[in-house]
Amino acid sequence: MKLRLGLVLCSTLLGAALAQSGSLTIESWRNDDLTVWQETIIPAFNARYPDIQVTFAPSAPAEYNAVLNSKLEAGSAGDLITCRPFDVSLDLFQRGHLAPLNDLPGMENFSDVAKSAWITDDGSDVFCVPMASVIHGFIYNQDIFAELGLSEPQTYEEFLSLLQTVRESGAYEPLIMGTADQWEAATMGYQNIGPNYWRGEEGRRGLIDGTIGYDEGGFLAAFEALAAWRPFLMNGYQATTYPDAQAAFTLGMGAVYPAGSWDISVFNQQAPFPMGAFRPPPPEGQEDCFISDHTDIGMGLNAASPNQEAARLFLEWMTTPEFAELYANALPGFFPLSNHEVTLQDPLAQEFVSWRGECASTIRSSYQILSRGEPNNENQLWNVSARLLNGEITPQEAAQTVQAGLEAWYEPQQGE
């Protein structure tokens, strides 16, 4: 996706900049991004609003939810709240901690899919500005592809044939991924290739309204497609953790890595070989394609903030093409959710985001509404995807287990 960015500030924002002063504190779990905020994002904002002091104050990721809730209850939370997607932030809004942003100028720059992670179920209130998504696909070692005469697969059948060629070479592992942590089997496996089978939003929304189940159609076919990975996973994958798999790929042990785009920054720093990427290939004969372009991070307004006007100016600035380009290039692999077209400097990140122009986007099937009950739909997908790849259950058993879990508490899936 290429486009020139217009970085001209509109007259209303400029006028507001001249009139505003104050200080803002941003709550976040992204402590890895501290330098980016301090050296890139906040200085760019202050170039427009020099009299608004902004402090990025992250907590440890694993502690963020608890720390933020404690601060909000005590009235000591920052003015701006970094929003996790879906139910965690919805709960904050329903408890009155996040202000509605329906009338924030610039929100029209985000599609319904982009806002879906931070909107009420009836669509009446949006409460966070969408910041970025992550995209799934496959990253590969270009040196191994060149040595073995491989090319990017156009269909799922070609993908499996490619993996077979690598296996037969005996020199490299075809597919670098472990199942020890479970989540990667679902996130980089099932949710990566699945949208091509359940047709993206059509299937995901069908699960929510109860017109389709995990044990039929594209959702069952996706489990069957995932099971085909078994012969090609790295030696000892059942005991391989996510960091171990990252290390194995950057050491050149394997040809293909099922990826989340957040892996790009890590691999850019650690892999000594050139890398390429290809999107999840659709099954033979399917002309259209679908990608997981998952809403991941947003920014909301603390309803109790004493600096409402300055905070809203910051959020309005976050809807501009200037912020979109700054954020995307400072954090390769986190992609803007606005409809501004952005040129990315990182070639691998640019390849990932280019798929938006080729395929329809969707989000992970379990994230909206379906993981509110017990058993948790997301956690069940982790478990059955890992067990499926470990050879402990069949695709049919995986599908039936997840479907039974959903039917146990989710009324639209319970039928008459």
Image: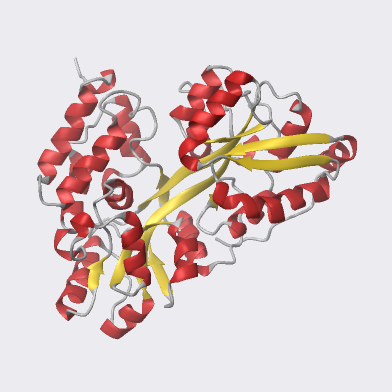
Image quarter (top left, top right, bottom left or bottom right) of the N terminus: bottom right
Is residue 306 shown left or right of residue 294?
right
* Residue 186 place in picture, x, y as percent: 28, 46
Residue 108 visible? The answer is: yes
Look at the image and tell me whether residue 129 can be seen.
Answer: no
x and y percent of residue 395 in the render? 13, 45
Q: Position of residue 184 (x, y in %)?
A: 31, 50
Q: Is residue 362 left or right of residue 311?
A: left
Residue drawn at point x = 24 percent, y = 52 percent: 179
Observer-nearest of 187 and 196: 187
Colour style of the rendered protein structure: secondary structure
Is residue 374 depicted above or below 221 in this figure?
Answer: above
Quadrant assignment, res 17: top right
> Residue at position x 32%, y 25% from top?
209
Q: Residue at x 66, y 37 (%)?
A: 26
| Residue 37, percent from left and from top | 66, 50
